[in-house]
Image (cartoon, rainbow, N blue to C red):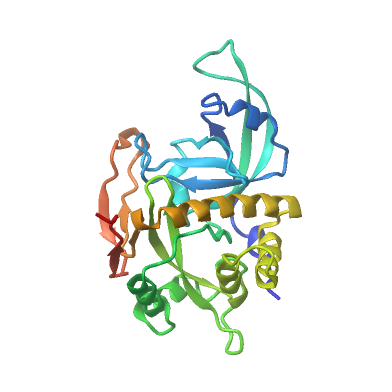
Amino acid sequence: PADTGKLLWYVPTHLVSIVGVSFEGRQEAVQKLQPGQAVLLLPEPSNTYDPWAVSVLTLEGTPLGYIGRAENQQFFLNGASIAKVRSMGPTLTTDEPQQQLFGASLRVQPALLHLLPLPLPCLPPDVAQSLKDICARGSPPAEVAMAEAREACEVTGMLDEVDHPLKVVPLWQVDYQGRGASVLRLAAVCPEVAEAQELFHLPQGTAQRTKAGKFIAQVNGWSPAELAQFEHMGDILQQTADLESQQWSFLLKTPVPQVVPQAAHPAEPKLGDQNDISAVAQQESPK
């Protein structure tokens, strides 16, 4: 079985506060947070105000706020991630010092790759074949991913063994607002993680989906209730993505925004070098 808790002890933990808790009716949701509760951190590359924006949501998909600009860029390495509520309670805002609002702080591990199989529409055949070729063990991109992972699963820490070889999988950044998905990079994972990612997209109620859900909950340290919340949100996102599938674009050659000093934070992202993944596919809306 996968050593699901191994990396948690070695990856640095940071404390961050949720910002923007006073907007769009988020106070009600923030006040309901409990210490130790899992929340979802989701990058928003198509955000009009900040292309580095990282939203904070409950596992049911309820918006809570954002990660502050001073810390948000580090969350773009692995895409969506998980945080745990450290504390919550009354706080004073800087904009309105006399107004008392509820805020929350989070424990985060930005360098840790989490097992979060977010839904996507069905991939076009050419995209699926390109990914299969890229991720095949022995291909140059896959070998680079294995070397960068030091031949250990990035989720569990399990080593690459002859009788239990690691798999290379695409790490997607899913942008539900912009109806697009891009491959951030390739990741090395153990067979159990790769299988759970694939089986979790099967319909609920099937034995394979249930097995995958239990494994994901174990890896992420979720309670059965938290898993149910994530499943509910995922089913809603899957239905929406399937209905809008003709409007989605898929990018396998991902421009990497340059990390810039916070004082010079741009309104639009600057584009630097590109990953060694050379395939681009896009579905156009029917005319």
Is 113 rendered above or below residue 103?
below
Q: Nearer the viewer, residue 124 or 127?
A: 124
Q: Quadrant of residue 210?
A: bottom right
Could you say where residue 78 lies in the image, as x and y percent from the top left?
Answer: 48, 57
Residue 110 visible in image: no
**Is 268 on the left or on the right of 240, as rendered?**
left
* Residue at the (71%, 64%) spot, across then down: 214
**Is 212 on the left or on the right of 244, as rendered?**
right
Is 136 rendered above or below residue 33?
below
Q: Nearer the viewer, residue 63 or 155?
A: 63
* Residue at the (55%, 67%) spot, across then down: 154
Q: Nearer the viewer, residue 217 or 274?
A: 217
Q: Quadrant of residue 137?
A: bottom left
* Residue at the (47%, 49%) spot, across then down: 75
Residue 173 visible in image: yes
Could you say where residue 40 lies in the image, as x and y percent from the top left?
Answer: 58, 47
Figure quadrant of the N terminus: bottom right
Could you say where residue 142 lies in the image, as x and y percent from the top left?
Answer: 41, 77
**Is 251 on the left or on the right of 237, as rendered?**
left
* Residue at the limit of the structure toward the top, as seen here: 98
Figure quadrant of the C terminus: bottom left
Q: Quadrant of residue 134?
A: bottom left
* Residue at the limit of the structure toward the front, as seen here: 287
Could you say where residue 187 lies in the image, as x and y percent from the top left?
Answer: 47, 69
* Residue at the (34%, 40%) spot, across then down: 261
**Is 7 on the left or on the right of 188, as rendered?**
right
Q: Nearer the viewer, residue 45 or 157?
A: 45
* Residue at the limit of the structure toward the bottom, as seen here: 162
Count every numbered label the image shows and give the total: 0
